[in-house]
Amino acid sequence: METETENEIAASVKDESSRGWTKLYLVVVAALAGQIAFYAWLTKTFD
Amino acid sequence: MSGIDIVVLGVTLFAIVFFGVWMTRNDQKLDEFLKGSSNSWGTIGLSVMATQASAITFLSTPGLAYDSGMAFVQNYFGMPLALILIAIVFVPMYYKLELCSVYEFLEHRFDSKTRTLGSVIFLIQRGFSAGITIYAPSIILTSVLGWDMNTTVIGVGLAVVIYTVTGGSHAVSLTHKYQMTVILSGMAVAFGIVVYKISGHAGFRENLSIAGALGHLNVVDFSFDLDKRYTLWSGLLGGFFLSLSYFGTDQSQAQRYMSGQSIRDSRLGLMFNALLKVPMQFMILLLGVLVFVFYQWEKPPATFLPESMTEAAAAADAETYQNYENAFIGNFKSQKSAMQEFVGALRAGDEALVLSSKEKLKLAGEESRQSRANLKTHITTVTGAESMKETDYVFIHFVLNELPIGLIGLLVAVILSAAMSSTASELSALATISTVDFYQSHFSKNQSDAHYKTVSRVFTAVWGGLAILFALFASMVESLIEAVNIVGSLFYGTVLGLFLAAFFIIRIGAHAAFVAAILAQLSVLFIYFSDIVTIGYLWYNLIGCGLVIVLSLMLQTVMGGRKV
């Protein structure tokens, strides 16, 4: 049972190779980085 | 509140409850009742957001920004990264195993006793916090609106119980959509009004410059100082682990995103939050900063705590009170002059003048802040209310005194909608775990779907009743609120450690994980109660999680390694 579940975990992660999802996750990371940069600019400009 | 406000509030809340009951009136399958298994990604996204946003989010967060600025937003920086990991690893596994309870996963990967351990820890945590979710906004609203505390608690609690019992998890997701619509509309209206009100004194950018000069636009802190509560690094690292544990292993959240039509919908619902949660928190904090600027132009009250306390302090010792108030009024006027001078310098575009007037404003701001703090301390000392947090009352004071009739009702509906949305998720999750992980798993395995639906409804009502009872008696033990937060941190780490070991460390087997979890939990409790080291309770999350992983690896090695 345990080994079966582990194989499923590995398979699930492999499914993630889909380019569409990878792009979406990159967009999320880029949006976070962009926000942090904007907040840093806001702090520097007004603080 | 005026009659119109009460009508707006009543109609808004009644419409949400009625909608929840009406839309789920048809017979649902057990799976749909427990998980709500047909939601689109938009509904999931709003439901996840509504579950996390409690009434305190909308009462306290603007007050926090009013008091100390915007640095709190950094706490959310780790969340998008945690949600990506959950979307990649956790969601597909939960779908493949067709789970109703996330703790079933621990049984698939380890064994039934580990699953029971995870479920028990969840019930302890959420059982406590469901009561607090109702109690915390009720105590604030009743003290400023003059409502009866018991009626408010029972009213809010029963409204949630009605649609959660009748419609189950599906009703919770559907009502979340409309609760979030009310919440976002109300906050947008409040934002527009404060911007309009301060625009009579200065332009938007000039008002931001004033907020900056008075130390309230400190959004990002790159320093590595461990003593500081909010920095970029603690937000990324601490926020990542906290979000991983909250979204990945807490049934009240997992149940929301597992209610999708497909894995795709669940992932998109999570990414919706990964993209929008940080900007939403930023806007709520910015609203608080703009309320702060408003009260630099317009004289704020001596304290935002209920007015009766100021009156009591003034009556108890009129002379001392007057002295403190005169000092504050004098400093407030000086600061307002300094603000006008600063705005004039900005408009003139003279850099040297801007710098000198900014320094003058900083000084005047500090003197004004100090004199108001003296006045506030005098009031809370005389009335014995030192423990009351003024920040919880800032936003509701602004709403009640500055918003037009009708919109006050809408904003109070925002706060109560938030209380109802998070309570509904908690009750639904508590009922699901009680039904699936305990009743079905240990007491009655082969009953019909109708039987389990009835049992789940009974559990929802029982947990709702307990939450209401807890909220009614919470005022007798004020320190319980902090106790709930501490209890959460003491147990969260162990559960996260179990899930991380289950997902990522193949060599750890069931017995090693279970014994390690017990040992880790006992160690965390020992560290907490023995006082051998004094640390903030949030650190117990990390300690518990780390101990489970390290101890289970060691135990597995001692036990001779696991056959894979």
Image: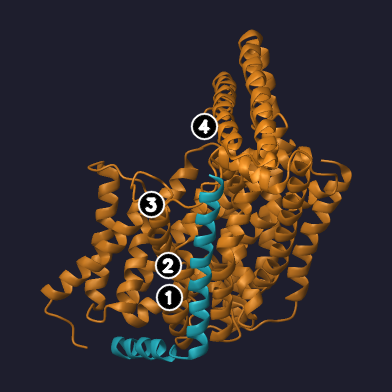
| Residue type, label 4 | Ser
Q: Compared to B546, does B454 lie above or below?
A: below
Q: Where, quadrant-wise, is the N terminus of chain B in this rendering?
A: top right
Q: CA distance from mark 1 to mark 4?
A: 40 Å
Q: Which residue is mark 4?
A: B387
Q: Chain of mark 2?
A: B
- Tell me if mark 3 has few (under 14), some (14-19) or many (20+) residues whose alpha carbon lies within 10 angstroms of its own: some
Write down which chain is painted orange: B
Relative placement, left or right, of B122 versus B281 is left
Q: Chain of mark 1?
A: B
Among the two numbered marks 1 and 3 on one chain, the one whose residue lies closer to the N terminus: 1
Q: Chain of mark 3?
A: B
Q: Which residue is mark 2?
A: B244
| Residue type, label 2 | Leu
Q: Chain A appears what colour?
A: cyan
- Respond whether the residues carrying marks 1 and 2 are from the same subunit: yes
Task: Report the front residue among A18 and B130.
Answer: A18
Q: Is residue B444 visible?
A: no
Are the residues flagged by discs 4 and 3 in contact, CB closer than 8 Å?
Answer: no
Q: Which residue is mark 1?
A: B85
SS assignment at label 4? loop
Task: Report the front residue among B535 and B172.
Answer: B535
- Respond whether the residues carrying marks 1 and 4 are from the same subunit: yes
- Respond whether the residues carrying marks 4 and 2 are from the same subunit: yes
SS assignment at label 1? helix
Task: Report the front residue among B351 and B298.
Answer: B351
Among the two numbered marks 1 and 4 on one chain, the one whose residue lies closer to the N terminus: 1
